[in-house]
Amino acid sequence: MTLSATATMFGAISIVNAIATGKGSTLGISLRVSVKITLEPGHMGISRNFVNDKLVNRIIRTILPNSLIKNHFISINLTSEIPAGWGLKSSSAVSNAVSLACYKLLNDKIYDRSVLNTAVNSSLWAKVSITGAYDDACGCYYGGLVLTDNHYKKLIRRDPVNEELHVLIFLPTGVARGEVKNLTYHKELFNHAFRLALKGDYWKAMNLNGVVTNSILYNNYLPATKALENNCLGVSYSGNGPAIAMVVHKDNVENLKNSLEKLEGKIIHTKANNTKSHVF
């Protein structure tokens, strides 16, 4: 009998980068990833329409019994609105979606922690993440504003976000990234940003995270200046960049877009998201 499961996962942006301290915060956005996994009886094999073979194979072999893998051809089809390699949590969204779909193939009852732990552990094993990115995984999986301890794979808190807020993402052209390891030399500043988020001052935390990350990795302040001139609530490099995420009220979107269009790069327009991932 042919089995099939389709998981939908959303993207996220950074509020506080977790590399320096292991503690991070993210905000869910409405860009989405969909992964359909189909098992057809017959010869063994795996086909996919995307890369990340090592990561995907690890997730599949962690969840699906070997007897099932040996007796089925596994087809994995991915559609994504999230550009890869920009710090917009595309790897977390994909690994979460593959993990969620695999668990659904085995059982209708889904255990969120199992889905997340498998995705995060596989990301660490495949070396696509430095910390395992539990903050990114939770942001994509649950939506809303999340705070996590990545070292202990612990969701500290999740707060709903105003879904009327818009998110502009600027993908700058020709920007060179500095050494990511240098983020670890500024633990106290990232700790301070995390403490602000813990108090609910998410936009202050995001702005501080943006200034610190920018000064270490990019030293390119013009996009952030444009954002703050147009009443942006929070602006920061997402993850390690080079994408720059900006949270704004609807009334300020067009003016901010017009300002960013004067710079070299691409603009993505989306919204804040509270919707949890789902599978059928």
Image: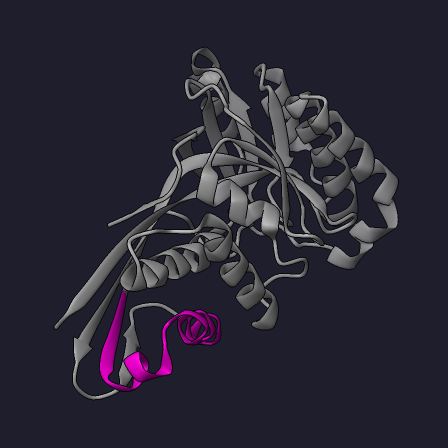
Q: For the image shown, how many numbered marks are present on the structure?
A: 0
Magenta residues: mostly which secondary structure?
A: helix
Where is residue 241 drawn, in percent x and y?
61, 48
Quick check: 212 left or right of 253?
right
Where is residue 182 drawn, in percent x and y?
81, 54
User: What range of the chain is rendered magenta?
Assistant: 52-76
Quick check: 105 left or right of 180?
left
Quadrant where the N terminus is found in the figure: bottom left
> What residue is at 23 percent from the left and 81 percent from the top?
72
Quick check: 104 left or right of 222?
left
Where is residue 154 drawn, in percent x and y?
64, 46
> What's the coloring here?
one colour
In the rendered image, the vertical position of residue 211 relative to residue 172, given as above or below:
above
> What residue is at 87 percent from the left and 39 percent from the top?
188
> What residue is at 72 percent from the left and 41 percent from the top?
214
Which residue, as the protein is rendered here, is positioned at the far left?
A: 1
